[in-house]
Amino acid sequence: MFREMYDFATSIIQEIEAKILDRNKMKTLLEDLAEKCPVSWVPKSECPII
């Protein structure tokens, strides 16, 4: 019983850690994109990331 709970908990932790890594990668990509067109008054058509 204890081993089953341990295995369950560690598998959930691994899933969460994978999601955190994915979110951090997305955050970095979005920050890089935001730096390329940082001002809000530039029309979307003139922003180099679009």
Image (cartoon, helix red, strand yellow):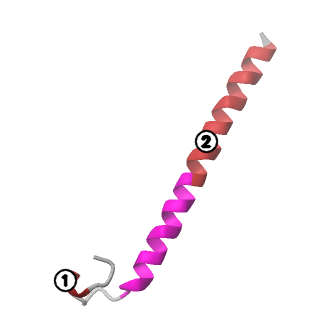
For badge 2, the amino acid type reads Ile
Q: Is 36 contained in the magenta span?
A: yes
Residue 41 x %, y %: 25, 90
Residue at image point 44% right, 83% down: 35
User: How dense is the environment of label 2, judged by Cα within 10 Å: few (below 14), some, or many (20 and up)?
Assistant: few
- The quadrant the N terminus occupies is top right
Can you name the residue that lies furthest to the top here?
A: 1
User: Taken as a whole, is the magenta stretch helix, strand or loop?
Assistant: helix
Say whether residue 46 is left or right of residue 30. Answer: left
Is residue 18 positioned above or below 9 on the image? below
Say whether residue 25 is left or right of residue 8. Answer: left
Q: Which mark is residue 16?
A: 2
In which quarter of the view is residue 37 placed?
A: bottom left
Say whether residue 46 is left or right of residue 38. Answer: left
Is residue 9 positioned above or below 33 on the image? above
Say whether residue 39 is left or right of residue 21. Answer: left
Is residue 35 positioned above or below 28 on the image? below
Q: Is 5 contained in the magenta span?
A: no
Residue in the foreground of this view, choosing between 22 and 13: 22
Residue 42 x %, y %: 25, 89
Residue at image point 76% right, 23% down: 6
Can you name the residue that lies furthest to the right here?
A: 2
Q: Nearer the viewer, mark 2 or mark 1?
A: 1
User: How dense is the environment of label 1, judged by Cα within 10 Å: few (below 14), some, or many (20 and up)?
Assistant: few
For badge 1, the amino acid type reads Ser
In which quarter of the view is residue 12 placed?
A: top right
Residue, disc 1: 45
Residue at image point 40% right, 84% down: 36
Residue at image point 80% right, 16% down: 3
Secondary structure at numbered mark 1: helix
Sequence-wise, which precedes: disc 2 or disc 1? Answer: 2
Give the extent of the magenta segment.
22-38
